[in-house]
Each structure stands twice: as structure tokens, then as C-alpha cells.
Image: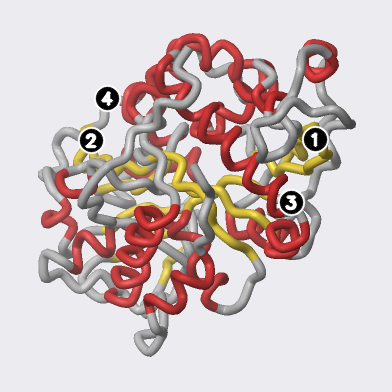
Amino acid sequence: MSKRISPPFSALLTPASRRSFLRRSAIGLGSMLGAGALGLSGMERSVFAGGSAQAAGTGEEATGPLEEVHLAWDQVEVCQAPISVALQRGMFARYGLDVKPIKFTGSTDQLLQAIATGKADGGIGMALRWLKPLEQGFDVVLTVGTHGGCMRLLSAPDSGITSVADLKGKKVAVTDAASPVRNYFSIRAAKLGINPETEIEWLQFPADLFSQALKKGEVQAIAGNDPQAYIQWKRDGLVQVATNLDGPDKHAVCCVMGLGGHFWRDRPKVAIALSKAIIEAQAWTAAHPDEAAKIFAPYVPGNVPVETIAAILRSQTHELHSTGALLRQEIATFVNDLKLIHVINPTTNTQAFVDKIVVDVPA
């Protein structure tokens, strides 16, 4: 059953950032929290037990116990594979951290709520879903833009849809009214002169029914995120009309690391160390996608082949990491674009808002 999503929507988010410069990291070449804490495997525990560690955020060898951190982890999302990499390869421990991953299932706005209320110290989610609740006062700060490339617009080969411009007058499947994918392609449409609230009909379906809705003619396109979108694209012989890495968005991130404001204020060195460990894990994943896929595969539900996980990782931009001024620039673009589609309040002071929620991670 589809659910019609009627305009206007002040859903939660969307990208469309323009990176005027990109920063390639060279580090490390070589919803609510429904489930309880996910215990580390024996292999992961052995990694934390051995070897020297840096004191959190200082680069010095740790002489005391590792700092315990609770990290929310959505194991359905392939783009979060770097967390498994950091766990297995001891990257967190090298930064003086004993990371306790908390298995999370649900939408990323629920994950944000968990971070804001202290049920987790941090997590990675889609920036364009988080900005509206952050505007409304959720106590979360952003430290790292982790990667781009999670979102895809797909259609059937005979649909006649070959670009975002062709969505005018069409029905498009999305998972929910707050979908960052919906917002992203709404922004793309708005910039082409299409009113995404009145000239595109967005219908809500479970992600695993997208292809079925397309085959039945209930929609003419589907707007989804990986891994489901990638799998449907390849499995069902669909046409990839657009992604969030097209054109000027090629170097834009879509996911970010968010940390609880309390965590950042009370334990800044630990928060910085966690952010740096994630950057290192992202860089290692980009350089070793096949190995990263093997590490992450046991966590993914549904027996997704390792080769598919590796292909998804290659299609994303885990080599790109934005912090500080660059991340503020990207988030400012997101905010202004979300104003364009009436998600962010037009009276919100973009620069003041961005300066409040984006904090600096020293090199």
C-alpha cells in the first residue's frame, strides 16, 4: 500500500552542496535505540586488548585505561562500514578509545534523538535529515562530513525519464515525508524551475516494495538510498537517472558524524579522538574497499554478497572528509537549499546556525 505525501512538506533534509575545494585525507592509507548494546566479538575484544594506544586526542601513548565511548551504529547502511573497520583494525584503540557499538535500527532522525538525549555519545547519519531538528534545538554538534553518494533516482528503461527534469507531472516512490532523498531530488527539481510540492507527486512505500510499485505502474520513478537502491538498480535492470554525486555535487558529502552536545562539552579530547578515528577508518575503507566489504559483510542482514558491498563502497566517496571551515561551507549550502523547499525556516540566520552546530576538529 502506498501512502500519498501531500504538500507542503517541511520534512527534514537534503543535499546539494557545492564544494569549492576538496580535501583528500591521507590519514590511514595503509529509530530510537530499540536494540541494546551490541557486544564486541571475541576478535574485536582481542584487538582492543593488545597494542599501545594514543591518549585520547593527544597523539601520546596512553598510560591509563581506554576512554569508553558509546557509538550508535546502523548496520543496515553500507556507508557505515568504516565503523566495523575501525573496530576490527584497532583504530579506535589507537586513539585511546574503547568504543562500545550500540546496534541501531530506525530512521536517522531517531538516531539523532538518541544522540541528543545521551543514549549514545555519537553516530553517523544523513545531514539532510538532521538539519531541521538541529534548527529546532536538538543538542548535537557536527564534526566530520564522512562521504557522499548514498542517494539514487531510478526508473524503468521504458519510462521516458532520463533526467530530474522529467519528474514533472510524475509519481515518485519515497520511504517517508522526511526522506532526505526526497528532499535532495526536490531541490534538484526546484533549481530546474519545477515546483516539487505541486508538480511532482511523492508516494510513500516501504523501500523493499519500490521495484514492485514501479512494475505495477503505481509510480514512474523511485528515489532511494543505498544499499537498497543499489541492489534494486542492478537486480531489476533499472535505469539510474541521477545520484547525489552528479555534476556540481560530485564532491559533496551527504552523511556526517554527529556528537551529543554534552559529550563535546564535557569530553572534548575524547570527542576529537573519536572524530579522527572515523576519518582514518573512512580513508582506509576508500583505499581498501574489498577488504572493508569483507569486514562489514557479517553485520549486514539479508546475506548481501561481499562483492555487492564492495561495489557500493566504490560508488561512494569515502576518500572525502570535510571538517572545520569546509564542513561549515557545505552545511551552509544544505541549509540554504532546504530553505528553497520550505524545510528550513526562511528567517533562520544561516551563518549563525552553522557556526552553532559545526565544531572544529584540529588536524
Q: Amino acid at mark 2?
A: Gln
Label whose residue precedes the other's in the sequence (1 or 4): 1
Is the residue under label 4 in contact with that under label 1 (CB below 8 Å)?
no
Is the residue under label 1 in contact with that under label 2 (CB below 8 Å)?
no
Query: SS class of the residue under badge 3?
Result: loop
Which residue is found at the position 12% from the left and 57% from the top? 165
Query: SS class of the residue under badge 2?
Result: strand
**Numbered disc in front, either 2 or 1:** 1
Residue 131: x and y in percent read: 48, 67
Residue at mark 1 to residue at mark 4: CA–CA distance: 40 Å
- The answer to which of 179 and 150 lies nearer the viewer is 150
Judging by the rendered image, the residue that carries numbered circle 3 is 121
Residue at mark 1 to residue at mark 3: CA–CA distance: 10 Å
Label whose residue precedes the other's in the sequence (3 or 4): 3
Residue 326 lies left or right of residue 53; in this view the side is left
Judging by the rendered image, the residue that carries numbered circle 4 is 237
Residue 240: give its label: 2
Which residue is found at the position 27% from the left and 42% from the top? 22
Q: Amino acid at mark 3?
A: Asp
| CA neighbours of label 1 inside 10 A, class few (<14), some (14 to 19), many (20+) | some
Q: Amino acid at mark 4?
A: Gly
Residue 220: give its label: none
Residue at mark 3 to residue at mark 4: CA–CA distance: 41 Å
